[in-house]
Image (spheres, grey):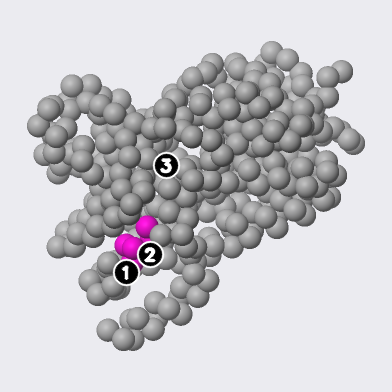
């Protein structure tokens, strides 16, 4: 019987980074991916600087465009905020190329990659786990579930109730006419409130636009109709080609733990995208790295790994979510109060958010108290 130290299920950012660091440190690692690679992945593809700068290798070959500034518009309000840095605040990637690049880095570091392996069951024994796919059986001391928002591994490994909050989103990849391309390819833009309790975005890629929108509203919304309206709002007249994809984003983390028995959850499977922007790549990369570090530092001891992983996730990601969720609630659900604050402190807010997504700052712990003081001062 071949026994791996760790089997990683999923070859996205969190899975590939976990496999990379584990293999780099001499552990026997395999990645199981249900698709053939490279594979298309629905995602806006905006890699913020805090995510890019944590990568231990250069990814310039898969970056389609870089933007040192970001435009923030508030729909229905005469508010336009802009933030600029001397580094790429957002790098545009196509997830098929980006993810394939990452998993190849893991492979080059010693990880074994098995494609077209759909996981059917995970059976945790006393000292190892048996992972059955539709083609093979693998054995491993630990399993990292990096298989996305609909994580099969989580469902069959003890997370029977989904405690994350999932929100709907649409992504629209379009090639536009030359006039529209020249006008819209120069900036990354976010249109807050274009859809109720959410925003729309326009991300220029190498030769096309990635448009999209999401809403945290619990009522049913016609996302396709809103997306069509956004295309008209941007005055896009000529569409040469188009691809429309729907997906779900978890904007709150799981409340029933991130490790059970011999299985660790990372990325979307753990519910780690940012509660305000729904950006998930940077925390996916970080959670994959943390999972690897926890297994290495825990010396393959289950209790040690559980303690370290829980603590590291809390210190680096989860503890900030309380402030981020408070801010998200204000931002999307208390629009009148938000607009009062934005009109007075908008530039400071934009700069602070840019600092957070550049990895220069973290969400403040006392955000509620700070905002109350600012409201009193208006």
Q: Which residues are magenta?
A: 348-354
Across and down, in percent, residue 298 comes to: 80, 47
In the picture, measured across the screen, residue 79 lies left or right of residue 179, that is right
* Residue 91, image quadrant: top left
Residue drawn at (49%, 34%) of the image: 58
Across and down, in percent, residue 285 comes to: 55, 42
Across and down, in percent, residue 191 comes to: 25, 51
**Mark sitting earlier along the chain (3/2):** 3
Judged from the image, the secondary structure of the residue bearing numbered disc 2 is helix
- Residue 121 appears in the picture as rendered: no
Find disc 3 in the rendering and name its residue. 47
**375 magenta-colored:** no
Residue drawn at (37%, 57%) of the image: 354
Q: Are the residues tagged 2 and 1 within 8 Å (C-beta)? A: yes
**Mark sitting earlier along the chain (3/1):** 3
* Residue 176, image quadrant: top left
The CA distance from mark 3 to mark 2 is 18 Å
Q: Residues within 10 Å of mark 2 (few under 14, many from 20)?
A: some
Find disc 1 in the rendering and name its residue. 348
Q: Quadrant of the N terminus?
A: top right
- Residue 96 appears in the picture as rendered: yes
Q: Residues within 10 Å of mark 3 (few under 14, many from 20)?
A: many
């Amino acid at each position: 019987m071949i026994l791996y130290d760790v089997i990683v299920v999923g070859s996205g950012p969190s899975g590939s980074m976990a496999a990379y660091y584990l293999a780099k440190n001499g552990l026997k690692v395999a990645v199981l991916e249900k698709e053939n690679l490279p594979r298309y992945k629905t995602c806006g593809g905006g890699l913020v600087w805090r995510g890019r700068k944590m990568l231990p290798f250069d990814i310039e070959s898969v970056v389609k465009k870089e933007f040192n500034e970001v435009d923030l518009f508030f729909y229905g309000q005469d508010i336009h905020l802009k933030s600029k840095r001397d580094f790429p605040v957002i790098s545009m990637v196509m997830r098929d190329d980006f993810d394939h690049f990452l998993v190849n880095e893991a492979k080059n570091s010693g990880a074994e990659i098995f494609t077209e392996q759909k996981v059917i069951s995970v059976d945790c024994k006393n000292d190892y786990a048996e992972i059955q796919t539709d083609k093979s059986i693998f054995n491993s001391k630990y399993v990292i579930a990096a298989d996305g928002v609909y994580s099969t591994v989580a469902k069959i490994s003890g997370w029977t109730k989904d405690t994350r909050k999932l929100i709907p989103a649409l992504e629209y990849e379009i090639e536009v006419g030359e006039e529209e391309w020249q006008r819209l390819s120069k900036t990354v833009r976010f249109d807050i409130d274009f859809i109720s309790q959410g925003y729309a975005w326009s991300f220029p890629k190498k030769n096309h636009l990635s448009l999209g929108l999401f809403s945290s509203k619990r009522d049913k919304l016609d996302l396709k109709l809103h997306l069509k309206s956004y295309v008209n709002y941007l005055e896009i007249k000529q569409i040469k080609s188009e691809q429309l994809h729907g997906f779900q984003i978890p904007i709150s983390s799981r409340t029933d733990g991130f490790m059970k028995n011999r299985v660790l959850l990372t990325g979307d499977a753990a519910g780690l995208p940012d509660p305000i922007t729904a950006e998930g790549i940077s925390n996916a990369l970080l959670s994959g790295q943390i999972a690897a570090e926890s297994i290495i530092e825990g010396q393959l001891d289950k209790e040690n790994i559980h303690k370290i992983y829980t603590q590291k996730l809390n210190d680096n990601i989860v503890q900030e979510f309380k402030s981020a969720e408070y801010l998200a609630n204000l931002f999307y659900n208390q629009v009148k109060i938000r607009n009062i604050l934005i009109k007075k402190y908008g530039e400071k807010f934009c700069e602070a958010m840019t600092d957070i997504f550049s990895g220069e700052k973290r969400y403040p712990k006392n955000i509620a108290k700070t905002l109350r003081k600012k409201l009193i001062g208006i």
